[in-house]
Amino acid sequence: MIIGIIGGGQLARMLALAGIPLGLKFIILDPDKDACAAPLGEHLCGDYDDTELLKVMANKADVVTFEFENVPSSSIAFLSNSVDVFPSEQSLETSNDRICEKTMFKDLGIPTVPFANVENEKDLNSAVNSIGLPAIIKTRTMGYDGKGQYVLREAGDVKKAWDELAGVPLILEGFAKFQREVSIIAVRSKQGEIRFYPISENLHEDGILKTAFSMPDDAIQAKAEGYAKRILEHLNYVGVMALELFDTGEELLTNELAPRVHNSAHWTIEGAVTSQFENHLRAICKLPLGNTEANGYVKMINFIGEIPDRAELLATPSLHLHDYNKQARPGRKVGHATIWSSSKLK
Amino acid sequence: MIIGIIGGGQLARMLALAGIPLGLKFIILDPDKDACAAPLGEHLCGDYDDTELLKVMANKADVVTFEFENVPSSSIAFLSNSVDVFPSEQSLETSNDRICEKTMFKDLGIPTVPFANVENEKDLNSAVNSIGLPAIIKTRTMGYDGKGQYVLREAGDVKKAWDELAGVPLILEGFAKFQREVSIIAVRSKQGEIRFYPISENLHEDGILKTAFSMPDDAIQAKAEGYAKRILEHLNYVGVMALELFDTGEELLTNELAPRVHNSAHWTIEGAVTSQFENHLRAICKLPLGNTEANGYVKMINFIGEIPDRAELLATPSLHLHDYNKQARPGRKVGHATIWSSSKLK
């Protein structure tokens, strides 16, 4: 089978590394000639809306997936006419618009932070009045790694944020006083089989995930699974989905979903019987899902900007290095490491 | 770093899959244009003694290794003039000649089956007299997967085997009445660091490995490690080495060594913290070795000839498929599967 992937970054690279042992082949669309997944398959080097390249992908691939959510919806629609695309256009669109996403959470009875649609300054002021400060203003679409969002702490911030962001659709969200940020990664096959990974506990720095811990047997596991299940079934979802959550100690609030393999579950490569990457491929290829059970405990550390000295890293007991083979650049995710342990790490 | 590999079969393929996350790149020499490791690196398509291609490899690679032991020694000697080759020419030569190999075992005080060098029919008859029947006659060099060897059960077999094999250097070996065949896989770095994997228990069919079990905490572990350590240090060995052993219940006898990653330790991909493939690369790249501890129990099944139905296979709980992407052909190793368990499998 040939799998088309839109995007050729580290997620595509780890999908390919998981899929090659399954006998899968890959065709990857990415405008960057040095896309780090490209050497692992056939590289279609061009824009994500290049119709000629999309045609090549639709013709060659048995199924298409994507490694990031900001794929032009026209490209997904175009591909969907002639080849299976998983997750579906509808799943992608729902997750891409924070208002649609949070409205879905609400409709499904899944707790989330208070939120309001902001189309003009009047909307913003009335949202601030009803939600209160602190709050977070975000673009409705296209945000990731903390980009396109501001925390409003006092009245003066409201005007400043509006001046900066006016002109694009916005959402105001209440500020959750969480004790920890967690995520649950789930996978659903075309046939409707669902599996959940143990939750991850995530630490961010400057809006970028820095460290994640696998948390087998965490007290909130069942509740998080319940939320994810409702969403997966509602969307008739196929593939791996990540749901980010705030644990306030009293409540478990959904933050957002990512319709793809997720940085917070990179630990599953070493720390689960079947990795999120393999299970995403199994799901979209209509194959039975693999065991998502943990085989130990893992701490994952993202390398942002550059990878530390290799020999020093590898001298750390039970450390695995994942070098994405990307040029070092400030703020760029260039690799990660996991440290595996047979006993609990924190 | 760029790693040269002589041979582009499944062992090279799994080495590359383990090395890509470490940031390594591969250049692979194999005469088969469809060599299954070739898509994972630069493919030098030509004979193993093609001087022009060996020059390209020597120029581009930072270190060279091999995936099978029958590499022409002239090629290893040629490469060794300008680039590090691990394991060394001496390690390869010793393991390639059953007489040298068994003489080394004897010199190091490591128990092995009785053996005798056979250069003519007179040698054979006197060897049969001293060793007794049953015995096994083997070519001194170039044997693998049970090829080039015959079991001599009665006097009549001796003449027949001689008629068949005369003309090549031979060895007669006593027949070990073993309870089980096991192997220990060890790795030694350039700096002399040594790690051992839990032993594997191996079941053969028609001379080809069919099934292997990882055996953490087996009673013979310490004895097997002691044998392997003596050999690694004697040869100043660098890389992964496999030592095949007969467990007679009373004694642990060495059978032969393989100077490379080994089929009986494919379970280490899922069943050990660091796989044999990653550790071989760490060793030859002068990097610290990874943890060889088991993270559970694994049964490995070789697929000979063809791979069974994929969906049925993947429905087996905790099964991992390794499809080598080779054409189906009777007797050919085309893939393997592992089944992982948190508790003992046998």
Image: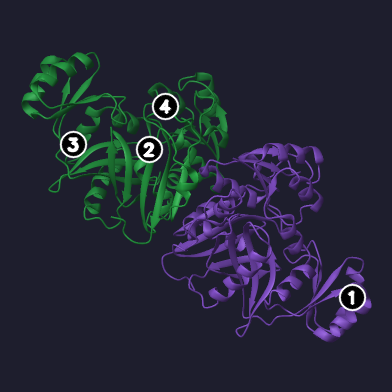
Chain colours: A purple, B green
Extreme residue in the front direction: A191
**Disc 3 residue crowd, few under 14, some 14–19, many 20+, Cα 10 Å:** few
Where is residue B217 shown, x and y percent of the image? 27, 58
Q: Are marks 4 and 1 in contact (CB under 8 Å)?
A: no
Where is residue B43 shown, x and y percent of the image? 56, 29
Q: Nearer the viewer, mark 4 or mark 1?
A: 1
Q: Are marks 3 and 2 on the same chain?
A: yes
Report the residue marked by disc 4.
B76
Q: Amino acid at mark 1?
A: Lys
Report the residue marked by disc 3.
B107
Q: Amino acid at mark 4?
A: Ile
> In the visual, does A59 lie left or right of B224?
right
Q: CA distance from mark 4 to mark 1?
A: 69 Å
Q: CA distance from mark 3 to mark 2?
A: 22 Å
Where is residue B41 shown, x and y percent of the image? 57, 35
Looking at the rendered structure, which numbered label has been put on residue A160?
1
